[in-house]
Image (tube, rainbow, N blue to C red):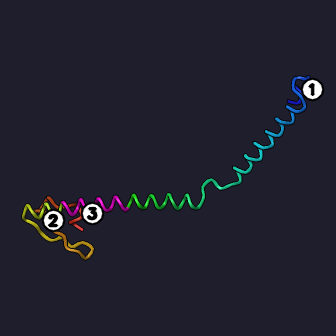
Amino acid sequence: MLQAHYADAISVDQLREEQDRITRERANARKQLSAPEVTKEQIEANVTAALDRVEARVQREVRYIEETMRAAALLGNERTLAFAGVDYLVGAEGLEPPTSSL
């Protein structure tokens, strides 16, 4: 830029405008580099969203297990499975979920 000015290819005003633009961009770059990449609020929102997805998945799995147990009970040959202090009905031998051996 300076060489272009010395060669009278650009005016002093154009040189000044370009220097001002470069100064602004450098200041913005420094500001962006010094600022944290992620805010606390963004982290909390991401964690909350992840936990909501986990909770929804667990609820779907619980509904699936409950439906499976109801279907097994309708087939007869049910037996009781005690798990975490709750009795569950499961189907005949070989039809029960893998957790029945716990």
Cβ–Cβ below 8 Å for labels 3 and 1?
A: no
Q: Main secondary structure of the magenta part?
A: helix
How far across and down, in percent of the image, does residue 52 sit?
41, 60
Which residue sits at x=73%, y=47%?
Answer: 28
Q: Quadrant of the C terminus?
A: bottom left
State the separation of the CA atoms marked 3 and 2: 14 Å
Residue sitting at x 37%, y 62%: 55
Which numbered dot is residue 62?
A: 3
Q: Earlier in the sequence, mark 3 or mark 2?
A: 3
Residue 56 placement, left or right of 88: right
Callout 2 environment at 10 Å: few (<14), some (14 to 19), or many (20+)? many
Please provide the residue range marked out in magenta: 55-67
Q: Is residue 11 left or right of residue 44?
A: right
According to the image, label 2 marks what residue? 90
Q: Earlier in the sequence, mark 3 or mark 1?
A: 1
Kind of residue at badge 3: Val
The residue nearer to you, when weighing 92 against 102, is: 92
The question of residue 61 being in magenta is answered with yes
Q: Which residue is mark 1?
A: 6
Secondary structure of residue under mark 1: helix
* Disc nearer the start of the sequence (2/1): 1
Q: Secondary structure at mark 2?
A: strand
